[in-house]
Image (cartoon, grey):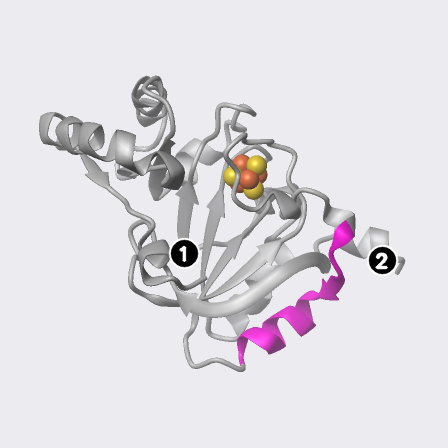
Amino acid sequence: MEKRDAVAAGLMLPIMEAFYTIQGEGAFTGHAAYFIRLGGCDVGCVWCDVKDSWEASKWPVQSIEEIVAEAKRFPGRKVVITGGEPLMYDLNPLTKLLKSEGFVAHIETSGAHPFSGDFDWVCFSPKKFKQPHPSIYEVANELKVVVFHKSDFEFAEKHANLVNSSCKLLLQPEWSKASVFTSQIVDYVKNHPNWNISLQTHKFMDIP
Ligand code: SF4
């Protein structure tokens, strides 16, 4: 099979980086996890801190067997698939293999492409720059809205009205605007206690 066809089938994927660390944000903050960052994103957030990920062709393509073999070198069995925008790819083959090897699979996605894969935890972080695909709302376990502008509170509520009723609701200050928005988020959550706060604790700990 040609590499291009294997990528289209989800049997090979462009890997920007993969590393074992501590999940710094969201509902699993503080948990050891192996991160697999896929190359490729067409969302275009102005404040993106991984702009290098956008161009998929910059990154080496690996088979899902190679990807999972790397993950197995570490003691943790929680894997977070991130990007880039990981749902640009068919994630069914990778998640099936991860599950068969005893991993728990999480995803962090903007939801901008149709959902694929068998995930134990879906972190949906919608972006204003590209509309989410409707398939994400039913499967999202966590709605994590990054607050970069005061209009993001309204944006957050719009998506909260669309996700399933058991989805956790999280507001997270964008790192460079944290000094502006953290106090507003604190006030917002005190007044809207169905929301919780997520912080990028890995940045405080200076770990990837
Ligand atoms: S969706 Fe993620 S990777 Fe893509 S531009 Fe936005 S922040 Fe960057």
Taking the spot 43% from the left edge, 37% from the top edge, the residue there is 125
> Would you call the spot at circle 2 few (<14 residues within 10 Å), some (14-19), or many (20 or more)?
some
**Residue 8 visible in the displayed image:** no
Badge 1 vs badge 2, beta-carbon distance below 8 Å: no
Residue that badge 2 annotates: 3
Q: Secondary structure at mark 2?
A: helix
Q: Decide whether residue 71 is among the magenta residues.
A: yes
Q: Position of residue 171 (x, y in %)?
A: 28, 35
Where the N terminus falls, by quadrant? bottom right
Q: Label 1 is placed on what type of residue?
A: Asp
Q: CA distance from mark 1 to mark 2?
A: 28 Å
Taking the spot 41% from the left edge, 64% from the top edge, the residue there is 207
Residue that badge 1 annotates: 120
Q: Position of residue 117 (x, y in %)?
A: 55, 51
Q: Which residue, as the protein is rendered here, is positioned at the far left?
A: 190
Report the number of numbered marks.
2
Give the magenta part as a residue range: 58-72
Where the C terminus falls, by quadrant? bottom left
Q: Secondary structure at mark 1?
A: loop
Relative vertical location of residue 179 with respect to residue 130 in this rendering, above or below: below
Residue 51 is drawn in which quadrant? top right
Relative vertical location of residue 3 with respect to residue 183 in this rendering, above or below: below
